[in-house]
Image (cartoon, helix red, strand yellow):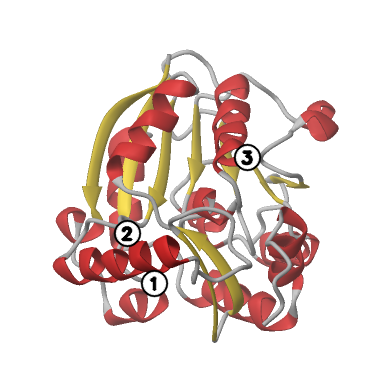
């Protein structure tokens, strides 16, 4: 096993790899918004004229879903160049060239400052995008950057996994605790809660937090907790969504 630690460069390369590009592009073209995503977007972002920014837009699944709902002042970005190219292609196909689509890193938006139009009235970081940033300090940096470009009172909608979401998860993480105690954890990962695996989407890094960790990160970056719930508590999803994604926790927070 390659013991080289996972970095942002690792994750970027994985998302630019062909299996990931195909997987997320297909979802953007065929899947669109989840029922739960649409319900929370319409609840917490009622003004379709408001300027919104989406971090980790990938191939445009959520971005073009927002456009289809009538949101027009949209800026979206991702740090995987190949996925941004796919999002631009899909936007052109659907007559949505007015969307500003950028290649940018959520942990440091200064290189694209001239292309941004803050303050934004709201932000989104969906499908666990925040949790695919290695290192807690870097995830906090991303939350800080979104805080910086949003207006006071702006909502941020994002998702995470949850290590305490079920008896099965809790049992799995008790075993992982034993691995860390013995020094037997995957040597590539950075922190407890990290996973690195391969499936139909290619190689995927994911950090799985518990609820307390997220609340601490929000407090440290100036966001006020508004709402959180597991996806199954928000809406019943069709089989296509369940096949595409595991259970997750939705969060809505407000810029202080």
Residue neighbourhood size for the residue with mark 3, other residues' Cα within 10 Å, grouped as few (<14), some (14–19), many (≥20): some
Q: Where is residue 70? Give x, y as percent.
A: 47, 45
Residue 108, quarter of picture: top right
Q: CA distance from mark 3 to mark 2?
A: 21 Å
Query: If you read the primary sequence from the N terminus, does the residue marked by circle 3 or circle 2 appear first?
Result: 3
Q: Secondary structure at mark 3?
A: helix
Residue that badge 2 annotates: 248
Identify which residue is drawn at 30% across, 38% down: 212
Q: Is residue 73 visible?
A: no
Q: Residue at x 49, y 41 (%)?
A: 124
Along the horizontal axis of the image, is 26 left or right of 223? right
First-in-chain label (3 vs 1)? 3
Q: Which mark is residue 3?
A: none
Quickly name the residue at label 1. 245
Q: Quadrant of the N terminus?
A: bottom right
Instruction: Work out how far the residue at label 3 is from the one at label 1, CA to CA, in angstroms.
Output: 24 Å
Relative to 65, say whether 43 is above or below.
Answer: above
Q: How many circles with numbers are drawn on the protein?
A: 3
């Amino acid at each position: 096993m390659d013991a080289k630690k996972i970095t942002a460069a690792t994750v970027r390369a994985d998302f630019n790899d062909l299996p990931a590009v195909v997987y997320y592009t297909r979802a953007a073209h065929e899947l669109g918004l989840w029922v739960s995503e649409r319900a929370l977007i319409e609840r917490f972002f009622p003004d379709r004229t408001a300027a919104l920014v989406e971090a980790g837009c990938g191939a445009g699944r959520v971005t073009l879903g927002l456009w289809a709902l009538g949101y027009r002042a949209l800026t979206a970005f991702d740090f995987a160049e190949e996925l941004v190219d796919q999002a631009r292609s899909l936007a052109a196909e659907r007559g949505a060239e007015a969307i500003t689509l950028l290649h940018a890193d959520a942990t440091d938006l200064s290189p694209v400052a001239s292309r941004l139009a803050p303050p934004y009235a709201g932000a989104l970081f969906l499908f666990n995008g925040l949790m695919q940033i290695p290192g807690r300090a870097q995830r906090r940096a991303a939350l800080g950057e979104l805080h910086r470009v949003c207006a006071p009172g702006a909502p941020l909608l994002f998702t995470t996994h949850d290590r305490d979401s079920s008896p099965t998860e809790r049992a799995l993480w008790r075993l992982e605790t034993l691995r860390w105690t013995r020094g037997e954890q995957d040597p590539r990962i950075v922190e407890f809660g990290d996973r690195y695996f391969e499936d139909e989407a290619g190689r995927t890094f994911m950090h799985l937090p518990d609820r307390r960790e997220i609340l601490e990160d929000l407090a440290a970056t100036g966001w006020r907790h508004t709402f959180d719930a597991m996806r199954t508590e928000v809406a019943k999803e069709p089989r296509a969504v369940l096949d595409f994604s595991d259970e997750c926790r939705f969060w809505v927070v407000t810029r202080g």
